[in-house]
């Protein structure tokens, strides 16, 4: 497993939590939720790409295609 991806996800989580708290304190809760949703979409995109690479590797190992 790539440890780099795990650190990226943790970094995004910490950064977004700080941004979310700052926006919530400023009274912009809708923007805070939007930033959280955007970060979730970014991390989900990373994970989907990693899963795609995993499935391609499994196909290559078992020569399924």
Image (spheres, rainbow, N blue to C red):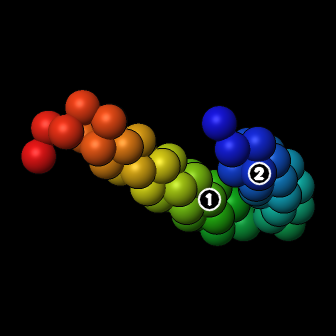
Asked if the residue under mark 2 is in contact with the one under mark 1, i.e. CB atoms within 8 Å, the reply is: no
Nearer-the-camera pick, 50 or 46: 50
Nearer-the-camera pick, 56 or 4: 56
Apparent side of residue 28 relative to residue 40 in the rendered image (left or right): right
Q: Is residue 24 visible?
A: no
User: How many other residues sit within 10 Å of disc 2, few (<14), some (14-19) or many (≥20)?
Assistant: few
Position of residue 30 relative to residue 48, above or below, is below
Disc 2 target residue: 4
User: Which callout, 1 or 2, points at the residue further toward the start of the chain?
Assistant: 2
Disc 1 target residue: 39
Q: Position of residue 65 (x, y in %)?
A: 11, 46
Residue occupying the point 24% across, 31% down: 62
Element at label 1: helix
Apparent side of residue 23 relative to residue 59 in the rendered image (left or right): right
Residue occupying the point 43% across, 55% down: 49
Mark pair 1, 2: CA separation: 17 Å
Residue found at the very far left of the displayed protein: 65
Q: Is residue 53 visible?
A: yes
Nearer-the-camera pick, 1 or 37: 1
């Amino acid at each position: 497993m790539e440890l780099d991806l795990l650190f990226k996800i943790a970094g995004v989580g910490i950064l977004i939590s700080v941004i979310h708290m700052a926006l919530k304190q400023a009274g912009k809760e809708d923007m805070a939720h939007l930033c959280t949703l955007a970060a979730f979409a970014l991390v989900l995109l990373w994970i989907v790409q990693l899963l795609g690479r995993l499935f391609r590797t499994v196909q290559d190992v078992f020569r399924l295609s």
